[in-house]
Image (spheres, grey):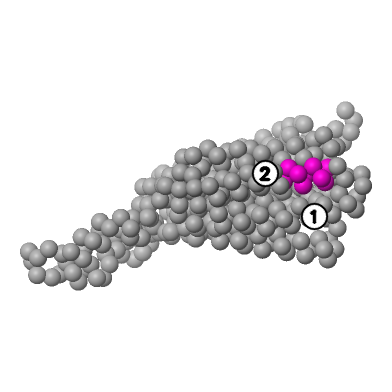
Amino acid sequence: MAALSRTSSATPRAVSSSRTPPRAVRAEAGVAGRPNARVSVRRSAPWGPEARRPGPSGQGSGAVGPFTPAMFAISVAWIGFSGFFFAFATDDWLYRALTMVQMVGVVVFSLGLPAMFHSIGEGEYLELRAMVIGYVVIRIAMVLQWWRAARESPPFHDVGMRNIRWTVLVQLAWIVVGFTHLTLAVAFVAFAVPGALELLLPLLAQGRAGGTPWHPHHVAERYGLFAIITLGEGVVGAVASSGDLLGGAAGTDWSANAVAVVLSPALPVGLCLLMAYLLHTLLLSAGDGCHLLLVSLTLTVLAAAVLLAAAGVGVAVCLLVVMLAPFATVVGYETIGHRHQRRMPRNLRTE
């Protein structure tokens, strides 16, 4: 699954406007008064690479559109596989072989991400064909997994067959959206229909059939890995995107707002930690004052990094402060939080 998120780095990178192409420099040094056709074509051609690459002021807004469906598809693929893994991970040769088939589908899906990013940048049609083909391969393996579970586990035959029917139905909806030549606006509206079905798929497939077994340690492991992968890719993405903001004679001067650079990793780090504490509270149906303290300390560290950037402190120092934010949770749990954690399940059993 990490391969999915890495593919977003395949999007075109912005070209620094401070660098003039060598050919253009030689052309501008020509005879005075002569029209410079080469320079005018290079600067005005709408089909050139520069025309497809947003400038520094539009990079964020131009990336949100393609980033949203990409991350949605990545998350759904992870959730779908994890839902089966929680219940029926036999880990035998057939299970591993079908998992390898899914990985082939992941590769095909990843190859379609640049085309989808480019189509949204062009603003005419949404290109999802390669991504949908990758999902078809993933879903073929997933249907075979559910068919095997339904066949070899009679108590869960009904839930297995319902998963197969709803998975095929949702995938057919994606095929219609992906292979119909829809304009960008219509495609995003149509995207919402199978997208909503994807989110409702566990309820539709398992609600009336009694559900499937699950293991709390497997849940924690799968989504803990997903969080680690997401945070790691977020750091890599922040470094890759921030590299184009370096300029100046020595190539070390920040050419954009330093606050925005610091916010780019600070916001996802804060959101990830907040969601972890929120999920803990919802799963145990109980709050804890220690958690409020640790969340407050974490957000304070992140806010301090942003304020330091606003005050003119070096961006490298501010990013190091952002890196220290999760340590508030780690140190808090290693000192006092673990005792609160042990008491909370006992309190639930006594209620």
Picture residue at 60% right of the left edge, 53% below the top: 132
Percent x, y of residue 261 = 45, 50
Residue 102 forms part of the magenta stretch:
no
Q: Is residue 201 visible?
A: yes
Q: Nearer the viewer, residue 275 or 161?
A: 161
Q: Is residue 54 left or right of residue 105?
A: left
Q: Which residues are magenta?
A: 159-167
> Which quadrant does the N terminus fall into?
bottom right
Say which residue label 1 marks.
145
Q: Is residue 247 left or right of residue 323?
A: left
Please name the amino acid that badge 1 sits on.
Gln
| Marked residue nearer the N-terminal end (1 or 2) | 1
- Separation of residues labelled 1 and 2 (CA atoms): 17 Å
Percent x, y of residue 175 = 61, 49
Name the disc covering residue 170, or none: 2
Q: Nearer the viewer, residue 196 or 245?
A: 196
The correct choice, above or below, for 178 with respect to 130 in the image is above
Picture residue at 75% right of the left edge, 37% below the top: 204
Q: Is residue 224 visible?
A: no
